[in-house]
Each structure stands twice: as structure tokens, then as C-alpha cells.
Image: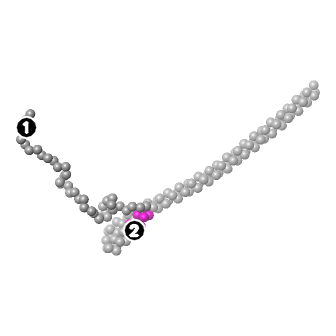
């Protein structure tokens, strides 16, 4: 086996050409987990509104516009969720109303069926009586 006299190159796992920036950033324009505002849509809307007002008082109109855009977005999200809730409630009311109508229709059908059965029974009883009378008349005639 042949031994090489050339020195081995060790490659570093860290790429030195990239900058490793782990410093804390307070730039609100960056998508950072720590800078995200948590809460429901209306809470986030109110928070962005207050941040926008603070930015205006500080004189940063661009940052204020950024916050106002986010506030508007969350306002739309909140209105959309409200509309969806209203639609669900209306559908539930319609479904309950339809269920009551169907129950009433079923009761009416059942009553009609019972009435028909009763009429059939009465008519069959009267036929039986008629048949008995006819048979007894025939027996007396003989």
C-alpha cells in the first residue's frame, strides 16, 4: 500500500463565509418567533393598533403604516370568523325548524295511517257482519 506524502485537508463543518448572526434583534419587520404577537384575532388587532399609535407618536410613519396593515388584516380575520359563526347559527336554526316541520309531517302521516287502518277495520267488521247476516239468511231460506 502506498502512503501519500501530501497533507490531509480537514474541512470545517462551519462555513466561515456565512455570517452567524445570533444576536437579539428587535426589528419588528423580521419574522421571528419571539416577536410574534399571540392571542385571538381581535387581541392581535388591538395590539397592532396600539403599536401603530406608539410608532406615530415616535415619529416613525413607515413603521406605523406597517402596524396598521397588520391590524387591518387581523380585523378582517375577526370579521370573517364572526360571519362564519353567524352563518352556522342560522343554519342550526333552519335545521331545527326543518326538523320540527318533518316531525309534524310524520305525525300527520301517522294519524292518517291510523285513520286509514281504523276505517279498514270498521269496513272489514261491517263486511263480516254482512257476511254473517247473509249466511244466516241463506241458512233460514234452506
For the point 42% across and 64% down, which residue is it? Answer: 43
- The spot of residue 119 in percent (x, y) is 78, 41
Q: Quadrant of residue 55?
A: bottom left
Of residues 47 and 10, the one drawn nearer to the viewer in this rendering = 10
Q: Judge whether residue 133 can be spotted in this image.
A: yes
- The spot of residue 3 in percent (x, y) is 7, 37
Q: Where does label 2 land, which residue?
A: 49
> Is residue 105 highlighted in magenta?
no
Left-right relation of 41 to 56 = right
For the point 33% across and 62% down, which residue is it? Answer: 35
Vertical comparison of 40 with 139: above or below: below
Q: Where does label 1 land, which residue?
A: 3
Which residue extends farthest top? 142
Which residue extends farthest left? 5
Mark 2 secondary-structure assignment: helix
Display coloring = one colour
- The spot of residue 66 in percent (x, y) is 34, 66
- The spot of residue 68 in percent (x, y) is 38, 67
For the point 50% across and 59% down, which residue is it? Answer: 83
Please give the label number shown on residue 111: none
Vertical comparison of 87 with 132: above or below: below
Q: Quadrant of residue 110?
A: top right
Q: Residues within 10 Å of mark 2 (few under 14, many from 20)?
A: some
Provide the residue span drawn in magenta. 41-48
Mark 1 secondary-structure assignment: loop
In the image, which is nearer the foreground, mark 1 or mark 2?
Answer: 1
Q: Judge whether residue 75 can be spotted in this image.
A: no
Closer to the chain start, of discs 1 and 2, is 1
Vertical comparison of 57 with 86: above or below: below
Amino acid at each position: 500500500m502506498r502512503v501519500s506524502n501530501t497533507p490531509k485537508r480537514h474541512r470545517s463543518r462551519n462555513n466561515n463565509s456565512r455570517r452567524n448572526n445570533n444576536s437579539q434583534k428587535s426589528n419588528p419587520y423580521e419574522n421571528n418567533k419571539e416577536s410574534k404577537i399571540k392571542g385571538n384575532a381581535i387581541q392581535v388587532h388591538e395590539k397592532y393598533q396600539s403599536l401603530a399609535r406608539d410608532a406615530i407618536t415616535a415619529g416613525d410613519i413607515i413603521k406605523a403604516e406597517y402596524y396598521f396593515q397588520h391590524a387591518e388584516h387581523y380585523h378582517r380575520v375577526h370579521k370573517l370568523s364572526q360571519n362564519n359563526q353567524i352563518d352556522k347559527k342560522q343554519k342550526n336554526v333552519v335545521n331545527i325548524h326543518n326538523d320540527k316541520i318533518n316531525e309534524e309531517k310524520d305525525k300527520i302521516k301517522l294519524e292518517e295511517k291510523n285513520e286509514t287502518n281504523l276505517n279498514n277495520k270498521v269496513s272489514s267488521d261491517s263486511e263480516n257482519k254482512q257476511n254473517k247476516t247473509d249466511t244466516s239468511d241463506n241458512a233460514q231460506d234452506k
